[in-house]
Image (cartoon, helix red, strand yellow):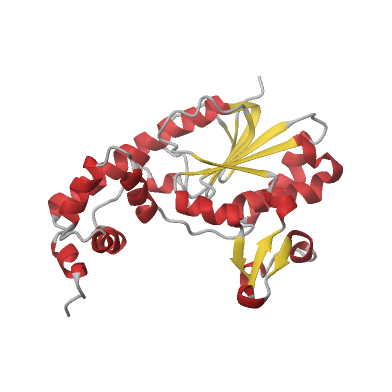
Amino acid sequence: MKQPGGMQGAAAGLGEREFREVRELARRTFGLDLKPGKEALVHARLARRVQELGLGSIAEYIEAVKADRTGLELERLINALATNHTSFLREPQHFALLRERILPELAPRASFWIWSAGCSTGEEPYSILFTAAERLGARLGAMRLLATDISTRALEKAQAAIYPAERLQGLPPGWPQKYFQRGTGRWEGSVRVKPEWRARVDFRRLNLMEDFSFLPRMAVIFCRNVMIYFDKATQERLVRRFEDRLEPGGWLLIGHSEGLMGVRHGLEYVMPAVYRKPAA
């Protein structure tokens, strides 16, 4: 079956060489390891942009990305390839740990930072914020919450904080009323994080492959279901740099589908998907 318009040309243009070029560009610029077998995914995500630009093939698109000195087309490529699947309180064991152990340790302090690295469309940092609000109460002002992602498209959604109402299913009783506004009119069926809570999250674009040594020392870093897309060498470099940004005794939480087996680092294993920098 033929695909309509320019999509057919784009499909014909994704050969082994083009896939290799996209793979190398993705690995070099933002650490994404597109393994063989992902050709259909790459085609599906890039063909639409090829059509928008009126180009004849993905090969032409790759040349356009490399020729664009502004970096905007590379950013669009990243937006197209980045996966932004997430949910509120995803991997709830981490939020139980945050509520029962980590936050009580941090509560007496005058200030501390938590970083959601790879925050996607915002569900993770808002889950951190709401958990902290419930646990810290009047002490919440001591927490500084940074949320970063490489995808500008995901960050725009995170800052807008508008979600389908069904996404709130399974949240603790009272949370939907306390933290969200329900949409009316054309927004019927949607909810939005209330403005006073949105204002407590510092959203920034950040490529984890680039230098982030300018960031403050973190008490907790959430980097979950991000490194699964990186090869071992990239994972190791990133974990070492996270380790540098953690304060002594700081926590690193990764995805349960990930692991640091074979990755050299100086962190202490606490439990599955949880590591801690030595306090000394």
The furthest residue to the top: 280
Q: Can you give x and y, in whole percent of width and height, for residue 229 in the image? A: 39, 48
Q: Which of 267 and 164 is in front in this view?
A: 164
Q: Can you give x and y, in whole percent of width and height, for residue 31 in the image? A: 36, 40
Task: Determine the image quadrant of residue 184.
Answer: bottom right
Q: Which residue is drawn at 69% across and 47% down?
A: 199
**Is residue 267 among the parts visible in the rendering?**
yes
On the picture, is 99 further left or further right than 202?
right
The furthest residue to the right: 138
Q: In which quarter of the image is the C terminus?
A: top right
On the picture, is 40 further left or further right than 59?
right
Question: How many discs appear?
Answer: 0
The answer to whether residue 152 is above or below residue 181 is above
Q: Nearer the viewer, residue 134 or 211?
A: 211
On the picture, is 56 further left or further right than 208?
left
Q: Which residue is drawn at 72% across and 40% down?
A: 102
The furthest residue to the bottom: 1
The answer to whether residue 143 is above or below residue 41 is above
**Is residue 122 among the parts visible in the rendering?**
no
Q: Can you give x and y, in whole percent of width and height, for residue 95 in the image? A: 68, 51
Q: Residue at x 61, y 27 (%)?
A: 216
The answer to whether residue 194 is above or below residue 133 is below
Q: Quadrant of the N terminus?
A: bottom left
Q: Which of 69 and 3 is in front in this view?
A: 69
Q: Can you give x and y, in whole percent of width and height, for residue 180 in the image? A: 72, 62
On the picture, is 178 further left or further right than 211?
right
